[in-house]
Image: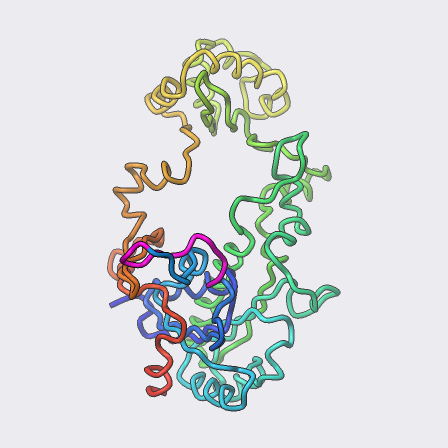
Amino acid sequence: MSALSHLRVLDLSRVLAGPWATQQLADMGATVIKIEKPDGGDDTRGWGPPFLKDRDGQPTRESAYYLCANRGKQSVAIDMASPEGQAQLHELVKSCDVVVENFKVGGLKKYGLDYATLSAIKPDLVYCSITGFGQQGPRADQAGYDFMIQGLGGLMSITGEQHGEPQKVGVAVTDLFTGMYATVAILAALAHRDRTGIGQHIDLALFDCQLAMLANVASNYLVGGVNPPRYGNAHANIVPYQAFPASDGHVIVAVGNDGQFARFAELCGHAEWASDARFATNKARVENRTALVPLIEAALIQQPRAHWIAGMESAGIPGGPINTIPEALAEPQAVARGSVVDIPHPLGSVRMVANPIKFSRTPIRYDAPPPMLGEHTQHILARD
């Protein structure tokens, strides 16, 4: 039995933050009913190429983007703008534990699908709203998208090379983090409901989650009062903790304490660095990074990546290569952990990155692919 096989979720969300949260719940065994527009369905179905290929190798209309966040769900095509669709959804919610939506603030009220309406139908309902800026505040009525939130929320100001332009992260991290916060919040609200019999409304904002993601960098500012700069691949609070050029490419060095630094200095052929007052402690190394980093660069450029990676592994110094995506997914560790799964699909099969959670008693199963548009409409509506 799966961990959440008792749970039923009505998924009204679109794009990535909401679907990412409901995929986590689906992975853990919840029945997730994904409500889609009859005409076209989820917008992300068209966010390609690439598109899934069928058994004959021909592209289909199922985009890789849509596939990545919708496995294990059941697709029901309903026009929520119609009285009939609204009645069907009101009936569905009676048998659901959770509703997840990411419409603009107040956007579902005209359809009778807002928290006030649905909680009157089912008082113990857990209702999670994901918006750009939350349910109140001067920006509450604005739409929010990952890219703009990365900029507005400060993340881009600390991402990129020190003297280059601000950069967004290569994946939609604000959406993904918000989805994960939503999953945690939903499970906590369900625990509260199970104790008290009372549901509640969860108000999650991409902007709030982005600020929380700043973690130690925000803390550096709040404690130190200095606007954090961009460090490229370096770390604000640890040195050396960055990528360095070897003779044939780049290698990551992630020294985490003074003992590791002493071993790293010896590996570089400069054991004296560890006794140099400028470099002996992490505090000193951070203060003198502009003196130390060129010395490390001069040492590492003398040998290829494999030399340094093998040496760091032998000495217990964190570090490694900078893999491409194909290299990362083919890493022996990824293979050993089953990090890529092949799931049967009505059109053939689809390869996906596995959920990283490993349960000892309720392992995650990969027997339900991302659904075709409206695939489960008749089954779900007939049941309810």
Residue 325 visible in rendering: yes
Q: What secondary structure prevails in the magenta region?
A: loop
Whether residue 42 sits left or right of residue 33 in the image: it is right
| Position of residue 48 measured from the top left corner of the image (x, y, whole percent) | 48, 55
Q: Residue at the location (47% across, 84% down)?
A: 89
Q: Viewer-proximal residue, 107 or 273?
A: 107
Taking the magenta stretch, the answer to whether it contains residue 55 is yes
Which one is nearer the viewer's eye here, 196 or 18? 18
Residue 152 counted in the magenta span: no
Out of 138 and 107, give the one closest to the viewer.
Answer: 107
* Colouring rule applied to residues: rainbow
Disc tally is 0
Q: Look at 50% across and 55% down and name the residue there.
A: 176
Tell me the quadrant of the picture where the C terminus can be found.
Answer: bottom left
Which part of the image, by quadrant, shows the N terminus? Answer: bottom left
Percent across and percent down for residue 148 are 65, 53
Instruction: Name, please, the residue furthest toward the right.
Output: 138
Magenta region, residue range: 45-57
Q: Is residue 220 above or below residue 60?
A: above
Dividing the picture into quadrants, the one containing residue 343 is: bottom left
- Please tell me whether residue 156 is drawn above or below residue 75 in the rendered image: above
Residue 319 percent location from the top left of the image: 42, 28
Q: In this view, does 106 lie to the left or right of 356?
A: right
Where is 345 relative to 199, above or below?
above
